[in-house]
Image (tube, grey):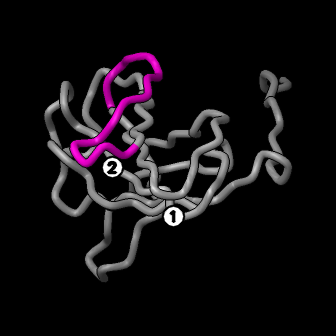
């Protein structure tokens, strides 16, 4: 199970990232993260502007995951407290967390339960 800990360095592409804690052994591929804004009634809007599907990767309780907004390649390292840190990259050219009121949502979406459909061209 994953938990969002913080969104850091908002609005700075080279260092903007979401920091997540692994609370129980899991596969990252069962999660997706998205942003949303809040309406005037303090309820989340249905405007999910950016969605990140995590790659298939087994992670262990006590480890951390850092989702960088910028481009890059997966790497594993260590936090300042010597915990395993998995670095994954969104591959975007613009920041995600750039507006006050942006909200990060983490969803569990196991691959076995996903459904998709490729939509073809409109018929005339």
Q: Where is 72 relative to 109, above or below?
A: above
* Residue on which disc 2 sits: 19
Asked if the stretch drawn in magenta spans residue 71, the answer is yes
Task: Give the position of the N terminus as an image quadrant.
Answer: bottom right
Q: Counting other residues with Cα less than 10 Å from the Cα at mark 1, is it few (<14), some (14-19), or many (20 or more)? A: some
Q: Which one is nearer the viewer's eye here, 76 or 47?
A: 76
> Given the current orientation, which residue lies at the most extreme front position?
82
15 left or right of 36? left
Could you say where residue 66 lies in the image, as x and y percent from the top left?
A: 37, 40
Q: Name which quarter of the figure residue 91 lies in.
A: top left
Q: Please, what secondary structure does the residue beneath circle 2 have? A: strand
CA neighbours of label 2 inside 10 A, class few (<14), some (14 to 19), many (20+): some
Q: CA distance from mark 1 to mark 2?
A: 13 Å
Give the residue at mark 1.
23
Q: Nearer the viewer, mark 1 or mark 2?
A: 1
At numbered mark 1, what does the secondary structure look like: helix, strand or loop?
loop
The residues colored magenta run: 69-83
* SS assignment for the magenta stretch, majority: loop
Is 101 on the left or on the right of 36, as rendered? left
Figure disc tally: 2
Q: Which residue is nearer to you in this view: 62 or 7?
A: 62
Q: Could you tell me residue 32's position as x and y percent? A: 57, 48
The picture places residue 62, in percent across and down from the top left corner, at: 46, 56
Which residue corresponds to the image point at 36% horizontal and 18% vertical from the top-left?
71
Residue at horizontal 85%, vertical 48%?
Answer: 112
Q: Position of residue 94 (x, y in %)?
A: 27, 27
114 or 3, nearer to the observer: 3
Q: Is residue 20 magenta?
A: no
């Amino acid at each position: 199970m994953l938990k969002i800990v913080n969104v850091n360095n908002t609005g700075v592409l080279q260092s903007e990232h979401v920091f997540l804690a692994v609370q129980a052994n899991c596969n990252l591929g069962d999660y997706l993260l998205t942003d949303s804004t809040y309406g005037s009634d303090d309820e989340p809007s249905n405007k999910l502007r950016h969605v990140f599907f995590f790659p298939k990767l087994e992670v262990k309780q006590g480890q951390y995951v850092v989702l960088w907004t910028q481009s890059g390649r997966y790497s594993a390292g260590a936090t300042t407290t010597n915990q395993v840190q998995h670095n994954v990259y969104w591959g975007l050219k613009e920041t995600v967390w750039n507006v006050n009121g942006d909200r990060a949502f983490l969803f569990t979406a196991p691959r076995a339960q996903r459904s998709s459909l490729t939509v073809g061209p409109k018929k005339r």
